[in-house]
Amino acid sequence: MNISIEDQLGLISFEVDKEKHIKVETSICRQCIDKPCLRFCPSKRFTLEKGEIVHNYEGCLECGSCKFACPKGAVDFSYPRGGYGVYYKYG
Amino acid sequence: MAEKFDVIIVGAGPGGCSAAYSLAKMGFSVLMVERGKYPGAKNVMGGRMYTYALNRLIPDFWKEAPVERKVTREKLTLLSNKSSVTLDFHDEELLEPPNSFTILRARFDQWFANKAVEAGATLVTNIRVDDLLWKDKKITGIVAGTDKLEANVVIAADGAVSLMVEKAGLKEFETKEFAIGMKEIIELPEKVIDDRFNLASEEGAAQLFIGQCTRQIPGGAFVYTNRNSLSLGIVVYINQLIESKVEAYELMREFNSNPAIAKLIAGGKIVEYSTHVIPEASRTGLFTDGLLVVGDAAGLIVNSGITLRGMDMAIASGMAAAEAVKIAMGKNDFSKKSLSHYEYLLKNDFVLADMRTFKRSPEFLQNTRLYSLYPELVCKLFHRLAVVKGPKRRLFNELLEETRGKRVRMVLDLIRGLRAL
């Protein structure tokens, strides 16, 4: 079974908010050589676009890894507003 | 709705529900606030709960709760590149009373929250608690949007990523203390699961894997059997994942196609993917003026390598929190000193006792040799025993050859292991 993360996220139910719940201070990311967020985020929400880190909050599973693992403290983590975000049917 | 409650509980997971149920039974006014669409909507766990704690609160709960299967087989598999060695443990004592059940949290947490509501607690969903309410440096309630709600005591039951603990100033987080878990639910017919795992109807298996499945990064993988699905996943320590330069999701993908796993999930259909951090060793303060912290929010997790426990610890801590609130209500004193009775209760119950017993375990479990040298070694030994391609030697000689130059470290690891686990 070989399934891409995009297909995995397609299986999950979301109530997408207009408001971003995670904010990334990209000026800090520019100083970060390793950029481990590209690897540790288990739903691959961090991408590199024209050399800049972009966080795609839609499809975020609110796991909290970026809050603890960003080595530069560039991630301002909060939860989506009540009722928004992921809702698991199995969990 | 009354503006002031005896207790407000943030989060309707097992810790929150256990506290809410206990407090409502004691006759206190309880408000439980959940940010998800329903209790369990945001919650992830491997898939198995030990019964011990909840059975004290709701005896024989499994007769009414939505449990999946009673775990009767415990398996541990050491994986190397091409081979695997599995220990398969079965004991009559796992059956009566049931030692653990596999469960699916979205269903289970809704049942548990409903028990609290039936007991008299008020549950509101779709509400995110933004902040704590303070008066004279004491916590006196919560803030949610424009609403301010007061309580004598607030119980932070908001999980591994507890914003309440942070707002209360109880703890600075450290990366090294967290692991990241990824999990899939794979649907398979009930009978197929029975056959593949050698199970009688309604009985279940819990299988842990160490070695190649995490590319030797400290952590492991698991498969739990639900009624007609498997919970399958990977857990790795975040800091060592970062050092390894491996991509987290790649581990999940590799696990699916590992020959040992591919056979178990063949013909199955993935119906959900979920992820969460796990506070493997990140104790926080347990109380302050007007606030108690339960479950994952307080880092109440025990990982002894074989048993990974969070949910039973959450439930037991919720019960202890309720007990501490009852005493504080009797004295009408909600100060830090009065609420410190909570810690006393946890120390005298298994929660903090077990945490103390296994306090060296997270450090020991981060030893990379556990995930590389040892699984490889055991697999190689069995390979030498099982494969016949020419003259054979005695096991002892094979062992000496395989461990050359590594024996001192192995003895030290054994001593450390015995002390930690």
Image (cartoon, rainbow, N blue to C red):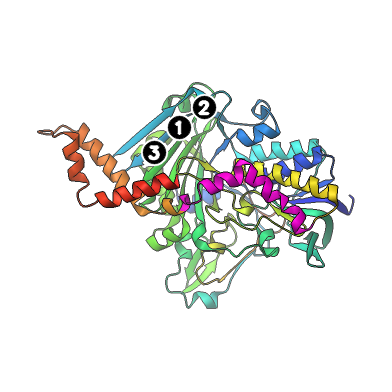
Give whichever of discs 1 and 3 has the lower sequence position. Answer: 1
Q: Residue at x 66, y 27 (%)?
A: B60
Position in image of residue B14 (x %, y %)? 66, 43
**In the picture shown, does residue B197 fall above or below B317?**
above
* Label 2: few (<14), some (14–19) or many (≥20) C-alpha neighbours in 10 Å: some
Q: Which mark is residue B94?
A: 2
Between disc 2 and disc 1, whose residue precedes? 1
Magenta stretch, overall SS: helix
User: Which of the two labelled residues, at mark 2 and mark 3, occupies the earlier sequence position?
Assistant: 2
Give the amino acid type for the residue marked by disc 2 in the picture. Answer: Leu
Q: Can you name the residue that lies furthest to the right here?
A: B2
Q: State which region is magenta.
A: B335-362
Position in image of residue B130 (x %, y %): 73, 61
Q: Nearer the viewer, mark 1 or mark 3?
A: 1
Whether tag 2 and tag 1 are in contact, CB under 8 A, the answer is yes
Q: Is residue A14 magenta?
A: no
Mark in the foreground, 2 or 1 = 2
Given the image, what chain letter belongs to the residue carrying mark 3?
B
Q: Residue at x 33, y 42 (%)?
A: B79
> Is disc 1 in contact with disc 3, using a CB cutoff of under 8 Å?
no
Q: Which mark is residue B261?
A: 3
